Amino acid sequence: MSDESVVRVGLLGFGTVGSAFAEVLAAHGDLAAHGDAAAHGHALVRVTHVFNRGVDRKRTHARAKFLAKDVVWTQRVEDVLESPDVDVVVELMGGLDPAEGWIRAALNAGKHVVTANKLLIAYRGAELFALAAEKGVQLRYGAAVAGGVPVIPGIAQGLSGDVITRISGIVNGTCNFILSSMEDGADYSEVLAKAQAAGYAETDPSADVDGFDARAKLCVLARLALHAEIDPDEVPTQTIAMISAVDFAYAKELGCTVRQVSRAELIEGVVSASVGPMLVPRTSPIAYSHGTQNMVVTSGKFGGDVVFSGHGAGGHPTAVAVMSDVRAIAEGSVQVRLPAQKMKVVGDVVAPHYLRFVVADRPGIVAAIAGALAKVGANIDSILQHRGFAGDRLPFVVTTEPSMSAWLKEAVEEMAGFDFMLEPPVCLQILVVDDRDTD
Ligand code: NAP
Ligand code: HSE
């Protein structure tokens, strides 16, 4: 860095997070002006370049006022990557391509990189970290999981002394916003549109609702916490799109609610992992998460459970994490690097399950469903049928005792073919709350 007291940032992407970063940085500039940061040995951070396609639209963005008048606005990425006036490239565009190539170019040019791009860190993190190490620069990604919640630095710095064997929780703010609003009576499509308007959802919101965003974040956490390098494509994911109001009504009767839960556990050298909607008992802290709140619970062999919680999506919370990474680089903080090795993923778990059917009522339906479950060795725990639904479209629920998820998948495939079944059955795991004791 040319002047020790100023760190120069080149911003790639001036969207929800990029523009919020400009605002957060401006607030730090005000603080620095009052506190005379440079005189106290703290580096000042300044954005020198902003790159975005169609950049003229961005110059007039409401948050452009937070940047200095002499900032270079450009739609030529080389103006940032090749500039001697950029020390840190902050990538806030998202996606694998072209972000990967541009981050590689920045690292190769000896620039530090800060990114919120979980997809890139999940799929290409190992190679990019190796490149950063080879070039003697930092690649920080604190905003990639749980937005403004410091779960990544928390695990890397605060928990690297433990042997973490399990991570679980909520890592997608959009799904949590949708499901917790549905719990209060909102309609799925309306609330998804709200999440998009508020800037929580990914460019393609199916990344949120179908679980791909959460799965990438889970893999980033597994690398750090479980030292397991896992392929995101191997992690089974289930969409939340088929969850309806009736599921919340039946879940309530079972003492539960519905949340998208991501979990990964190290069991004898393999990682058991999955992402999808689950029935969460109201006694679990996960059930209390509302809106864009994220909650990650790490379970350590020696330290027990640690809970990280806060706003997991949205421009400002995410920009805080980006700013913290830039500050860490500016202050010369050493980055913690933890080893990780490639591991296989298994999706199967033994757990109680919730099966919801919508049927055209007639005699023999419960017997047919019980037969399919008996065939795979799954034992029924309860049958719930609320009164008041019309017989030509009747929703009801069966819960099972702990059963292998693969067995239930097989049974559900058979049930989907029954002539009275009006919709594919919904099969959700019921989360078991187990507080592991430590000595
Ligand atoms: P966004 O609002 O869509 O902003 C992305 C910006 O990058 C837009 O201005 C977009 O331009 C620009 N851009 C994208 N691809 C480009 C390309 N190939 N060339 C030039 N410009 C390009 O997205 P965001 O919500 O800020 O998310 C940014 C990153 O942060 C993503 O990795 C996301 O997963 C991550 N993240 C987001 C949140 C959140 O709550 N939003 C939270 C945590 C992490 P256009 O305006 O032309 O599209
Ligand atoms: N779309 C993501 C979410 C943004 O809803 O959690 C934060 O990574």
Image (cartoon, rainbow, N blue to C red):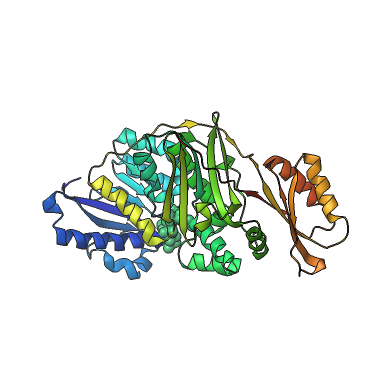
Residue 158 in view (yes/no): yes
In front: 432, or 149? 432
In front: 112, or 261? 261
Q: Is residue 207 above or below residue 195?
A: above
Residue 305 position within the rendered picture, expressed as x and y whole percent measured from the top left: 45, 42
Quarter of the image for residue 303 reads top left
Residue at position x 33%, y 44% in the image: 106
In front: 93, or 352? 352
Quarter of the image for residue 337 reads top left
Residue 308 position within the rendered picture, expressed as x and y whole percent measured from the top left: 42, 49
Most extreme residue toward the right, as rendered?
A: 363
Q: Is residue 423 above or below residue 325?
A: below
Residue 96 in view (yes/no): no
Residue at position x 36%, y 61% in the image: 316
Most extreme residue toward the top, as rendered?
A: 268
Image quarter of the N terminus: top left
